[in-house]
Image (tube, grey):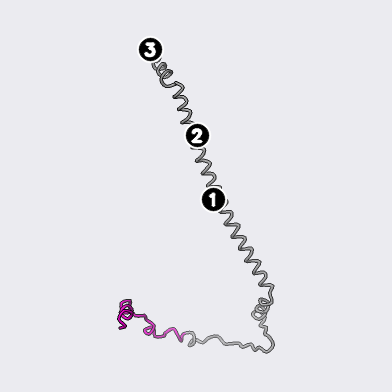
Amino acid sequence: MNKIKTSVRRFLFKIKHEYLIADNIILFAAVALSLLFTFYSVTAMSRNWELANRVATADRNRALLQVEVETMELENEYYKSEEYQELAARHFQNKKLPGENLVYLPANSDYAKNKHKNADLSSRQTPSNIAQWMKFLFGI
């Protein structure tokens, strides 16, 4: 039992006189403060980065909405213009200006729709890459 008490006393003495001296306490406090400072600095930078991203996103959304509002205002001005009203009247009500004639054309026939489908494509084919280079370099 005395050996255990002695070893415990030696251990406590060693800790008290070798490790818990003023220099070591100051060093430990400085390391702890620097770690805390580093941790809170990184935390603050991370938070600032996230907030900056939120602000940038909000700015982009605001700019997009502003462009949409301006576009709608321009469309409203166009719809109020005489030009649009005239085009709408011509399109929806078949109106015409004095001296104009309206011509109603029949729908295209099958012949007109298929006229250019079977055109000869051989005349439109471009020469090969080598043939183009030969023509460019040697005029062949």
Residue 120, above or below 21: below
Check disc 3: other Cα within 10 Å, few if <14, some if 14-19, many if 20+: few
> In terms of image quadrants, where is residue 88?
bottom right
- The residue to which callout 2 is attached is 36
Q: Give the Cα separation between the discs numbered 2 and 1.
A: 26 Å
Q: Is residue 127 magenta?
A: yes
Seen at 52% across and 47% down, the residue is 49
Q: Residues in magenta?
A: 114-140
Expressed as whole percent of the image width and height from the top left, the position of residue 40 reads: 52, 38
Expressed as whole percent of the image width and height from the top left, the position of residue 71 reads: 62, 66
Q: Is residue 45 left or right of residue 7?
A: right
Marking on residue 6: 3
Q: Nearer the viewer, mark 2 or mark 3?
A: 2
Residue 136, above or below 54: below
- The residue to which callout 1 is attached is 53
Sequence-earlier tag: 2 or 1: 2
Q: Considering the numbered disc 2 on the image, is that residue within a helix, a strand or a loop?
A: helix
Sequence-earlier tag: 2 or 3: 3
Expressed as whole percent of the image width and height from the top left, the position of residue 70 reads: 63, 64
Q: Is residue 124 left or right of residue 83?
A: left
Check disc 1: other Cα within 10 Å, few if <14, some if 14-19, many if 20+: few
Q: Considering the numbered disc 3 on the image, is that residue within a helix, a strand or a loop?
A: helix
Q: Give the Cα separation between the discs numbered 2 and 3.
A: 39 Å
Amino acid type, residue under disc 3 in the picture: Thr
Q: Is residue 82 magenta?
A: no
Amino acid type, residue under disc 1 in the picture: Asn
43 or 17: which is nearer to us? 17
Q: Give the Cα separation between the discs numbered 1 and 3.
A: 63 Å
Whether pointer 1 and pointer 3 mark residues with C-beta atoms closer than 8 Å, the reply is no
